[in-house]
Amino acid sequence: MTYGFFGLGLIGGSLARNLKKIDPDCFIMAVSRSSETCEKALREGIIDLICDGCKDARFARCDILFLCAPAERNLSALPELKEVIRPDCLLTDVASVKTPIHEEAARLGLSSQFIGGHPMAGSEKSGLDNATDHLFENAYYILTPTAEVSEERIRQLRELTLRLKAIPLVLDPKEHDFITAAISHFPHVIASTLVNTVHDLDSEQGHMKAIAAGGFRDITRIASSSPAMWESICIENSGNIARVMDAFLDRLIEARDRMCEGDGGYIYQMFERSRDYRNSFSFASPGPVKSSFRIYCDIIDESGAIATIATILAANGISIRNIMIVHNRVFEKGALAIEFYRQEAMKKAVSLLQHHRYTVWEND
C-alpha cells in the first residue's frame, strides 16, 4: 500500500507512525507546511518520501491520501490534489468538523472517492514530536461517507481503522458535527472561558491560581490546546456550538436563580442527575477529551519519599507522564498525584503501590 499525507502534526504523524508499525513494507509520502517536520519524519523512518507541494505528480501513486492539515488548509488543497490523484485513490481527512470538507468535495466532484474521518483521540500537546504509534487504540474513529461512496471504499477504510486498533463508527456528516459540538467543541469553550474568568477575578497576589486544586485542573486541562486549531473549529462549527451553548446558558441561568432563591431541592436534584448520567459513561477508550490516568498516593513528607515511589514504578517498567505534589487537600485524595500515559500502566501502579503498603486512590 502507498499512503499520502497532507500534514504531519499530532494526528497525521501518529497515523503515519501507526501505519509503519502495522505494515512496515508500506510506502508513505508526505508534504507539510514545515520542511523541518518532513525532514525529521524522513530521518526517523516515519515517511519514505517528501513531496513538493500538493501538485506533486507522485501523489498519483497513493492508494489512500490523508488530509491532516488544519481544516482551512485541507479545503484549499483539495482542488490541487484533485489534479494529481487517481480516480481509485481513497481520499479522507481527520478534521473534527465534517460538513465544510464534504461540501467542497461535492463541489469538486470528489464525493465518490471521499470519506470524512475523525479519530476521536488526541492530546493537549500538538506536533510531530508528540505523535505516537498507539494514539488511536480503543478510540472511536468516526467515518462519514455519503451516498456517492461505494460500500467497498467504506469497507476498505473501516478495516484500516480496525488495524489501527481503533473503533470505527459510521455517522452522517451533519449528525457528527452536532455530536462533536456538544461533547468536544463546547467543552473547550467552557474550559477556556472558565480559565479566563478566574484570571480576571484573581487578586494581584494570584491566590486563586496558587490554590487551584485538582478539580479545577481536570476541567480546564483542555484549555491548554492550540488556539489556532480551536479558532478554526469554532468558526466552522459555530451554528452547532451556538445551539449547544444556548441550551447550556438556559440551564446555567436557571441554576443561578434557583441557588439564589435557596431552592436546595432543585440544586440537589441537579447534582444527582448529573452524577448518575456521568457515572453511566464508559471511559474505557479515549474520547475527544482525552482521559487522564491519574492516581493519588498518601505519603509522609520526608526526604526520599517521592524518589522511593518513582523507583518502584521504574523498576517495574512503568512510565510516569507527570508527578505533582498536591498542596490543597480540601478536594484531593492524598499528597502526591501521579499521571500515566495509559490505563494499563495506572492499574499496574495501583497494585504495586498497594503491595508496598501505600494508600492509593484512582482518579474517577
Image (spheres, helix red, strand yellow):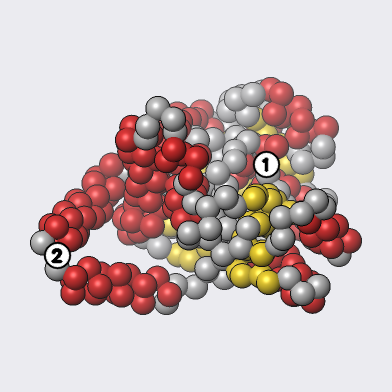
- The secondary element bearing badge 1 is classed as helix
Q: Residues within 10 Å of mark 1 (few under 14, many from 20)?
A: some
Q: Can you give x and y, in whole percent of width and height, for residue 168 in the image?
A: 54, 65
Could you tell me the amino acid type at mark 2? Gly
Tell me: residue 277, above or below residue 250. Answer: below
- Residue 144 position, x and y percent, is 43, 57
Callout 2: SS: loop
Image point 10% across, 61% down: which residue? 261
Q: Which mark is residue 90?
A: none
The mark found on residue 262 in the picture is 2
First in sequence, mark 1 or 2: give its number.
Answer: 1
Position of residue 216 in the picture relative to residue 133 (left or right): left
- Residue type at mark 1? Asn
Is residue 226 found left or right of 187 in the rendered image?
right
Foreground residue among 325 and 119: 325
| Residue for badge 1 | 130
- Left or right position of 208 against 325: left
Report, in whole angstroms, how far the alpha carbon at label 1 lies from the one at label 2. 48 Å
Between 4 and 227, the one lying in front of the other is 227
| Residue drawn at the location 68% of the way across and 72% of the way down | 359
Report if residue 118 is visible in the image: no
> Of tags 1 and 2, which is closer to the observer?
2
Whether residue 123 is situated above or below residue 126 in the rendered picture: below
Percent x, y of residue 269: 24, 74
| Residue located farthest toward the left when viewing the structure as drawn | 261
The residue shown at (49%, 51%) is 213
Give 44 or 257, whichever is nearer the viewer: 257
Residue drawn at x 25%, y 73% as measured from the top left: 268
- The reply to whether discs 1 and 2 touch (Cβ–Cβ < 8 Å) is no
Residue at the outermost right position: 315
